[in-house]
Image: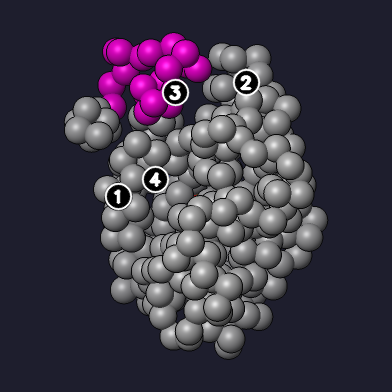
Amino acid sequence: MTSDAPGALSAAAAGPAKESASEQRQGEPPPAGHGARGLFLTFEGGEGAGKSTQVARLAATLRAATGREVVTTREPGGTPKAESLRAAVLEGVAKPYGPFAEALIFSAARIDHLDRLIRPALARGAIVLCDRFADSTRAYQGAAGGVDEATLRALERVVVGRTRPDLTLILDLPAETGLARARRRGGEGDRFEAEALGFHERLRTAFAGIARAEPGRCAVIDATPDPDAVAAAIRRAVAARLPGLLPAETSLPDRNRDRDDAA
Ligand SMILES: Nc1ncnc2c1ncn2[C@@H]1O[C@H](COP(=O)(O)OP(=O)(O)OP(=O)(O)O)[C@@H](O)[C@H]1O
Ligand SMILES: [Mg+2]
C-alpha cells in the first residue's frame, strides 16, 4: 500500500473481531455469520464478467422457486447516499487521492448500504443478491491498487462486521474477454475500465486467491460460456452450497460441471 494505516485500523487489525459501530448501535449481536434470518449472496469478478446479468437471472429463479422476498442491489451504491458516492468514484473524483482514499469512500458507501438496505432486508428474512461487495475492495484497491492487505482487512472488519455473505459467486474469465464485453455493451467506460490490461489481470488473480482462501464462502463460476450456461452453473452452486433453497439440477448440459465438482 502507499500510505500508513491509521491507528484505529491498526488496532482493529490486531485486536479481536469487532462488530461495526452500526451493528453495535442496532444492539442485536448475531450468534454466527450475520445471524439474521435472510440470506446474503454476493457476485464478484472483473469488468464485464456478467455479474449484473446473472444477479437478475438468479433473482428471477429464486423468486419463482422460493416465493421469498428477493432484494437485488449493487456496490458501490444501493442507497441514495451510496449511489452519489458511486457516481463520484466511478467518474474518478477520488483517483488523485490514491487507492486507500478510494477504499475509504467505498467503505463510507458500504456503511450506508449495510445500515439502510442490507441488514434490514436480512432481518426481514429476505434473500439479498448484491452485485459486488467487500471482495471488490480487496481486489481493486488491494491486489490491483496496491493498498496493504492487512489495512484493508481491518477496514473490512470494522465496516462489514459480521454481515458477511453466506455465498459469494466469483465469475471468472480472462480479463480481455470481460473488457471486450464491457466495450460492446457501449456507454462511456468508468475510471476502472480505463485501467491497463495488467490491472485487470491482477483483479482476476486476486479474486481467484480470495476463492482459494475462503472456499467455504466462495464458488468460482466459469463465466466464459453463454449466459444460460453460466446461469445454470450458478443455480447448481446455489443448490449445492445452500441446500433446500433450490431443487438440485442433475441433467443440465454445461461447461462448469468439472469446476463445480472440483470446488
Ligand atoms: N455469458 C455471457 N456471454 C457473452 N456476453 C455476456 C455474457 N454475460 C453477459 N454478457 C454481456 O456482456 C456485457 C457485460 O455483462 P454485465 O453487464 O452483466 O457484466 P458485469 O460483470 O456486470 O460488468 P461490470 O463489471 O462492468 O458491471 C453485457 O452487454 C452483457 O449482455
Ligand atoms: Mg455490472
* Quarter-of-image position of residue 227: top left
Q: Which mark is residue 146?
A: none
Image quadrant holding the C terminus, namely: top left
Indicate the position of residue 158 as horizontal and vertical percent values: 58, 59
What predominant SS class does the magenta segment belong to? loop
Is the residue marked by circle 2 packed among few (<14), some (14-19), or many (20+) residues within 10 Å? some
Label 1 residue near ligand 1, CB within 8 Å: no
In the rendered image, which residue does mark 2 sit on?
63
In the rendered structure, the answer to whether residue 28 lies left or right of residue 10 reads right
Q: Which mark is residue 170?
A: 4
What range is drawn magenta here?
Answer: 236-255
- Looking at marks 3 and 2 on the same chain, the residue that comes earlier in the sequence is marked by 2
Identify which amino acid the numbered label 3 is placed on. Answer: Leu
Indicate the position of residue 83 as horizontal and vertical percent values: 73, 59
* Quarter-of-image position of residue 260: top left
Residue at 73% x, 27% y: name it: 124
Indicate the position of residue 87 as horizontal and vertical percent values: 70, 67
Is the residue marked by circle 1 packed among few (<14), some (14-19), or many (20+) residues within 10 Å? few
In the rendered image, which residue does mark 3 sit on?
242
Q: Are marks 4 and 3 in contact (CB under 8 Å)?
A: no
In reply to whether residue 163 is colored magenta, the answer given is no
In the rendered structure, the answer to whether residue 15 lies left or right of residue 22 reads left
Identify which amino acid the numbered label 2 is placed on. Answer: Arg
